[in-house]
Image: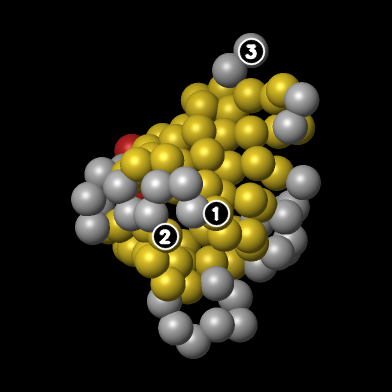
Amino acid sequence: MFKVNEYFGGNVKSLAFENAEGPVTVGVMAPGDYEFGTSTVEYMTVTSGKLTILLPGETEWKNYKPYETFVVAKDTKFKVKVEEQSAYKCVYK
């Protein structure tokens, strides 16, 4: 079944499920600045809008548009800037 997740006072929401890819979430983010922690490797794909990401160990922010994917290492934190309502898919490995 689906599990509903809500973070940052409801500004980030996701639905978690499992399929042949493994654990997956699909979600939406309202405009704002966020920091997330990981416990597994995460493959995040923007599905709508734009996410601006600062990955661990990096000094420059990078923009990701629909159909672009970035990978976040296990047991790290990454920062996200959202300028417009945006959506994503995250696969956990």
SS class, disc 3 = loop
In the displayed structure image, the side of residue 74 where residue 77 appears, left or right: left
SS class, disc 2 = strand
Give the labeled residue for mark 2: 64
Q: Amino acid at mark 2?
A: Tyr
Disc 1 vs disc 3: Cβ atoms closer than 8 Å?
A: no
CA distance separating discs 1 and 3: 26 Å
Nearer mark to the viewer, of 1 and 3: 1
Nearer mark to the viewer, of 3 and 2: 2
Disc 2 vs disc 1: Cβ atoms closer than 8 Å?
A: yes
Q: Is residue 58 above or below residue 20?
A: below
Which numbered disc flags the more N-terminal residue, 2 or 1? 2
Residue 81 is situated, as x and y percent measured from the top left of the image, at 34, 63
Mark 1 burial class by Cα count in 10 Å: few <14, some 14-19, many 20+: some
Give the labeled residue for mark 3: 1
CA distance separating discs 2 and 1: 7 Å
Residue 36 is situated, as x and y percent measured from the top left of the image, at 52, 58
Give the labeled residue for mark 1: 69
CA distance separating discs 3 and 2: 30 Å
Q: Amino acid at mark 3?
A: Met
Which numbered disc flags the more N-terminal residue, 3 or 2? 3
Q: How is the image coloured?
A: secondary structure
The residue at the point 65 percent across, 41 percent down is: 91
The residue at the point 56 percent across, 50 percent down is: 44
Residue 34 is situated, as x and y percent measured from the top left of the image, at 39, 60
Quarter holding residue 73: bottom right
In the displayed structure image, the side of residue 82 where residue 88 appears, left or right: right
Residue at far bottom of view: 59
